[in-house]
Amino acid sequence: MVGTCGFTRSKDDHAEYLKNNGEDYCWVLIWVDDALWVGPRTMVDEAKTLLANQFPVTDLGRAYYFLGIEIIQQPRHITLNQSAYIQKILVRFKMTHAYTVSTPLAPGTKLERTSTTQDAEFEDSDADEKEYPSMI
């Protein structure tokens, strides 16, 4: 991308590349073997052609999804939507009937230990230490 196509790699995200031709900008976001091109059609087509001269490239056309994000394109306006991904996560963790609340517990609720032994460690044989971070 840098040498052949004239893009500059982002210092903040090494999967992001930028090209400026003086008036317009073209971005390329790369994830493994997928790329999302954002910019004027002429700049995108030129960069894709240069890249295709070096590597086998399959152009899938206009992007509708990228990394679980739905892309809704309108003239001069793009909307990003993750509702399908969120629904998939809710199904995975059996939370499709969960509802949001402004405060998980009523203000002033006192929490008390349920174990009769104060020094007993909390054990939950069904707990998976990777499940909670995945859910979050």
Image (cartoon, rainbow, N blue to C red):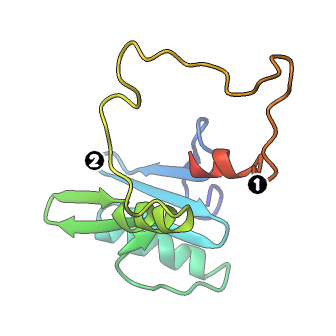
**Identity of the residue drawn at 61% across and 53% down:** 15
Q: Is residue 92 above or below residue 136?
A: below
Identified by mark 2, the residue type is: Glu
Q: In the picture provided, is 82 more to the left or to the right than 114? A: left
> Residue 32: where, in percent of width, then height?
67, 67
The tag on residue 126 is 1
Residue toward you, 28 or 23: 28
Q: Element type at marker 1? A: loop
Residue toward you, 69 or 35: 69
Residue that carries the numbered disc 2 in the rendered image: 23
Residue closest to the far front:
116
Q: Is residue 20 above or below residue 1?
A: above
Question: Which picture quadrant has residue 10?
Answer: top right
The tag on residue 103 is none
Question: Which picture quadrant has residue 31?
Answer: bottom right
> Residue 35: where, in percent of width, then height?
53, 68
Identified by mark 1, the residue type is: Asp
Question: CB atoms at circles 2 and 1 under 8 Å apart?
Answer: no
Say which of marks 2 and 1 sits in front.
1
Chain-order first, disc 2 or disc 1: 2
Question: Which picture quadrant has residue 108?
Answer: top left
**Label 2 – label 1 distance at C-alpha:** 58 Å
**Identity of the residue drawn at 42% across and 60% down:** 86
Residue toward you, 41 or 14: 14
**Identity of the residue drawn at 82% across and 51% down:** 125
Residue closest to the far left:
75
